Image: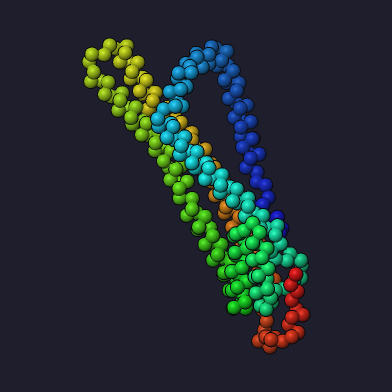
Amino acid sequence: MALTPSHRPTREWPLLVLALALVCAICIPLWQASAARGDAGNDWSKWTPERLSRLLLGPEQIASYCCFTWAALILLGRYLEVRRQRRAFDLELLSTDAGVCILPEDARLLQRRVEQRAARGGPFILANMIRLALGKYAVSRSARDVSDTVRTQADVDLGRLVASMATVHYLAWAIPAIGFLGTVRGLATSLTLGGQTSLEMSKFISDATRHLNVAFDCTLVALVLSLVVMFLLHSVQRDEEALVIDCQQYCLEHLVARLYELGPEEEGSPASRIKGQVI
């Protein structure tokens, strides 16, 4: 199969490296200048093991970790499935030789050959698309009908892939929602301390600050996890959409473009078999 735009390496990662280099070139000198004044040392000294434990190991954070791990495992499975589906392009389901034509009488034979080759390691989206297109060609003998079948099946496959991502979309929404629940809990607990007049001022400030830390720590961790999940989600969705597009393009190049429509005077003529070569 010819190299398609979705197969070609994108320039997104080099641009990411360039963006990081530019940001680091600006921020690192400023950071070093701040450290020379002694400000950075005071900031880092506040992050004690106890403070890090409260930041990362709260109940809301653990719930966010569970959702994140669940979503990551689902996306890993989807990514591996895309890799498996890509192997269908190497099975030589259709001939890629120039000058090959496909006659309506050849459709059933090709259909059986595609099913046999796809049986090893299948099912494959590409093989199913070719099988349906050949079945349509054997019945209608129309290249336009075959093209419509390929387009319709591509829409069906893409819709199925999008619908099966519903759980991951929910988890991507649930992670920041859990963080906001922790924020509400921390703020509510801090506000309840205001009615306790028996507390000394220093203890009141300490307890209120601790609960406010809980409130914002939950949101911080949840939003970071949400950013990672959304990046992984969009990456996998892009790979799945590229897979369906490449399957559709493969069918257009090696199936639809090679269909030979017989004229009324050629139907049933033995000479018509000479015009098609099936490999």
Image coordinates of residue 18 in percent, x first then y, are 64, 35
Left or right position of 20 against 206: right
Residue located at (52% from left, 55% from top): 161
Towards the viewer: 194 or 273: 273
| Residue 67 visible in the snapshot | yes
Task: Write down the quadrant of residue 185 in the picture.
Answer: top left
| Residue 43 visible in the snapshot | no
How is this picture coloured?
rainbow
Residue located at (68% from left, 58% from top): 89
Left or right position of 171 against 188: right
Image coordinates of residue 126 in percent, x first then y, are 62, 61
Left or right position of 40 against 134: left
Image coordinates of residue 243 in percent, x first then y, are 61, 55
Which quadrant of the rendered structure holds the C terminus? Answer: bottom right
Task: Write down the quadrant of residue 67 in the picture.
Answer: top left
Q: Number of numbered discs present?
A: 0
Residue located at (43% from left, 38% from top): 175
Which quadrant of the rendered structure holds the N terminus? Answer: bottom right
In the rendered view, would you say 261 is above or below 17? below
Towards the viewer: 205 or 122: 122
In the rendered view, would you say 21 is above or below 250? above
